[in-house]
Structures are given as structure tokens and as C-alpha cells.
Image (cartoon, helix red, strand yellow):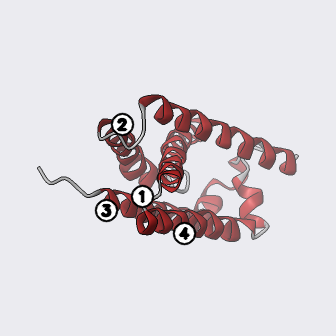
């Protein structure tokens, strides 16, 4: 069995983020056109994309974590490693969020393919490996997941408040 180095795993976190952001960016226009007026008022993506906030938000949400990943690889400092594992926890929770949203809308949502095929299984792999190889303790892994859930709740709440 081929075991990836820790740096390879951290690099793949960045690659999965790039792929996911690219899918979201590229599929939003056709998604919005296909769903048209069926888009519920609570769904924040329509307002984000229409206002041109989405491209900038996706750029920031991709570049900033990539910088953290690069710093973690170059310096091998524990706080940066934990930060990258938090990024992975956010991607994992985001995958579940995509699946729930797709279920509620009964439709494809931008980012669903990479969320299900890459971010969900890879997120589980990374966090399990981080615990198994003692990069972090089990309690820290769960704290990262809970923090990622809270980030999603805060983000969704803020977008819904802006849309309302």
C-alpha cells in the first residue's frame, strides 16, 4: 500500500479545494439558469452569484487556505498543521452541506460532484490518518469538525440575513 507523506496529504488538501472551488465557479451560471424561479428564497447562492460577490469570495476562500497549507508544509509548525486540518474539516462539513442542499432542492448544486467524490472520502481519510499517526489527538479532530459546523452555521446565517 502506498502511503502518502504528510506534505503530500497537505498538498492534496489544497488541490481538492482548488477543484471544488473551480466546480462551484464554473457551474453556478448553468445551475441558476436551470433552476430559474424554482430557487427557494432561503437559498443564498443566487444573491451571491448575481452580485458578483461569489467569484471574489471563492477566490479568497481558495487562496488564503492555500497560503496556510504552503506555510504548514514549509515550516512544519504544529499550529499551521492544525489550521490545515481545520480547512479539511471545513471541506468535509461542506460536503455534507452540499448533499443536504441537493436533497432539499432535489437538484444538482454547484460543487456537489467534488464534494461527494473527493472532499467527503478524502476528509474522512485525512482526519482518521491525522489521529492514527498522532498529528493530533482524537478530541482535537472532533473539535475541528464541530468548529467547521459552527463556521457553516455562521456563514449561512450571515448570508441569509443579507439576503433577507
When the figure is inspected, residue 39 is found, relative to residue 27, above or below; the finding is above
The crowding category of the residue bearing disc 3, from other C-alpha atoms within 10 Å (few below 14, some 14 to 19, many at least 20), is few
Upstream in sequence: badge 4 or badge 1 = 1
Residue at 66% over, 70% down? 55
**Residue 137 appears in the rendering:** yes
Secondary structure at badge 3 equals: helix
Secondary structure at badge 1 equals: helix
- Write down the residue under mark 3: 8
- Write down the residue under mark 4: 67
**How far is mark 3 from mark 4, CA to CA?**
15 Å
Measured from the top left, where is residue 19 in percent x and y? 44, 65
Q: Residue furthest left?
A: 1
The crowding category of the residue bearing disc 1, from other C-alpha atoms within 10 Å (few below 14, some 14 to 19, many at least 20), is many
Q: Nearer the viewer, mark 4 or mark 1?
A: 4
Upstream in sequence: badge 1 or badge 3 = 3
The crowding category of the residue bearing disc 2, from other C-alpha atoms within 10 Å (few below 14, some 14 to 19, many at least 20), is some
Evaluate if marks 3 and 4 touch, with contact meaning CB atoms under 8 Å apart. no
**How far is mark 4 from mark 2, CA to CA?**
24 Å
Upstream in sequence: badge 1 or badge 2 = 1
Secondary structure at badge 4 equals: helix
Upstream in sequence: badge 4 or badge 2 = 4
Evaluate if marks 2 and 3 touch, with contact meaning CB atoms under 8 Å apart. no
When the figure is inspected, residue 23 is found, relative to residue 151, above or below; the finding is below
**How far is mark 2 from mark 3, CA to CA?**
17 Å
- Write down the residue under mark 2: 131
**Residue 18 appears in the rendering:** no
Residue at 40% over, 45% down? 123
Evaluate if marks 1 and 3 touch, with contact meaning CB atoms under 8 Å apart. no
Amino acid at each position: 500500500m502506498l502511503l502518502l507523506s504528510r506534505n503530500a496529504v497537505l498538498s492534496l488538501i489544497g488541490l481538492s479545494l482548488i477543484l471544488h472551488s473551480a466546480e462551484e465557479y464554473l457551474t453556478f451560471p448553468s445551475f441558476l439558469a436551470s433552476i430559474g424561479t424554482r430557487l427557494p428564497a432561503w437559498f443564498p447562492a443566487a444573491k451571491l452569484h448575481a452580485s458578483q460577490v461569489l467569484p471574489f469570495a471563492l477566490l479568497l476562500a481558495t487562496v488564503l487556505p492555500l497560503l496556510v497549507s504552503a506555510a504548514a508544509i514549509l515550516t512544519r509548525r504544529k499550529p499551521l498543521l492544525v489550521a490545515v486540518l481545520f480547512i479539511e474539516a471545513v471541506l468535509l462539513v461542506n460536503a455534507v452541506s452540499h448533499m443536504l442542499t441537493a436533497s432539499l432542492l432535489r437538484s444538482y448544486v454547484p460543487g456537489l460532484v467534488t464534494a461527494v467524490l473527493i472532499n467527503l472520502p478524502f476528509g474522512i481519510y485525512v482526519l482518521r490518518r491525522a489521529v492514527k499517526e498522532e498529528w493530533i489527538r482524537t478530541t482535537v479532530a472532533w473539535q475541528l469538525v464541530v468548529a467547521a459546523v459552527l463556521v457553516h452555521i455562521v456563514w449561512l446565517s450571515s448570508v441569509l440575513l443579507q439576503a433577507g
